[in-house]
Amino acid sequence: MAEHMSQSELDYPFKLLEYFNGFRVSKVIFSACELGVFDLLLKSQEPLTAQHVARELSTSVDGMERLLDALVGIEILEVETSDGKVLYSSTDVANLYLAKGSAKSLHEMIIYQSQTIYPLWNNMVDAIREGKNQNEKTFGLPSEDIFQVIYRSEEEMLKFMGLMNSSWVLDGHDIVTAFNLSCFETIVDLGGKRPDADDASCSMLHVLLPGCTGALAREMAKAYPSSSVSVFDLPQVVETARKHFSQENDAFVFQTGDFFSGDIPDADLYVLARIIHDWPEDKCLTLLKKIYDTCRPGGGILLVEAMLFENRRGPVMAQIFSLNMLVQAEGRERPPSEYTHMLNKSGFQNIQVCRTGKSYDAILAIK
């Protein structure tokens, strides 16, 4: 905007005001999801009055009417007047992505953003000043144990797994088809204990591979039916994934183990999805070197991350994700050159980068 600011923007800062109000727009959608607005409208199959919605969801009529009007304003809902009644209905986008029952629902992602990420971002100024995450100030838990915060209860663990599941339902196909992976007969999504976690807490403190819910592995198995696909993670995570996220006819299997203290299963391709961005470089190198030492000649590793541009001009989503890593974890988002550097330092040489144009990108490295 700075280089291409129009005279009209200088006369009146429309874009800046839109940015200023971004958090309010987010909370409108978050609140509607938490209250169940989109589920009710989808279920009804016909437009509803604010009074009807308020009665069904146990809210005030005045508050619900204002919320519904705001949702109309941001083009999430439709409104019409019939026989003197104001009637609200869902758009196709709301039905597809915001209602719980949809195959592409982002409901769990939104709940996590609202109840976990939003409170953390309230302490962003302190995160920038201190250069560390704000888990202690936000949740009263030690800042160095980032996964203790994420898995501080079974409910929170399910929220986070739901977030990851939503991510791969949305972006998984683009990731697994970024490269032709059909040459890899065995593919393993790796998850394991957090570096330096003590044995007593390892059941809850570990690097969670987003695929541990099965969403990314499911997409991998669909794209490469001749390959053997598995998810490797701690027993508790596997148990939770099987209980809450399994689907009939899943063409992948779960394996239990510990990434850091145990052996890595044999495979032709190892997947690390949204893992490397959690940690500073030294911990990333520990992960990558262990995989390289286990990897067969001709085998490879697939990194899935939101990559920054080398010129630091975007993508804005990746830049926002990087700030989130500051406020919530220990790592950051990186440009391709930094991932290439770490992979080379770990021993990998043949490296390819693919930008999907969506939220996440892919890097394939061959031993």
Image (cartoon, helix red, strand yellow):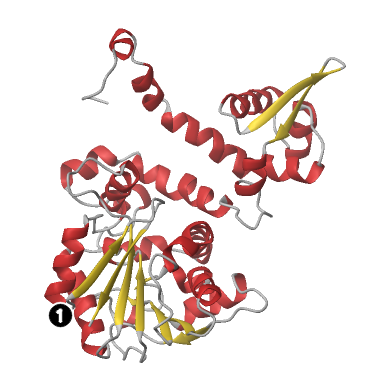
Image position, residue 182 (x, y; %) = 43, 80
Image position, residue 209 (x, y; %) = 40, 70
Q: Is residue 210 above or below residue 327?
A: below
Q: Residue furthest top?
A: 11
- Kind of residue indicated by mark 1: Gly
Instruction: State how many labels appear.
Output: 1
Q: Residue at x 53, y 77 (%)?
A: 221
- Residue 305 lies left or right of residue 62; in this view the side is left
- Residue 80 lies left or right of residue 223; in this view the side is right
Q: Which residue is mark 1?
A: 347
Image position, residue 259 (x, y; %) = 33, 82
- Residue 74 lies left or right of residue 318; in this view the side is right
Q: Residue at x 37, y 52 (%)?
A: 139
- Residue 216 lies left or right of residue 362; in this view the side is right
Q: Nearer the viewer, residue 367 or 97?
A: 367
Q: Is residue 182 above or below residue 215?
A: below
For residue 165, say whether it is visible.
yes
Q: Nearer the viewer, residue 164 or 179?
A: 179
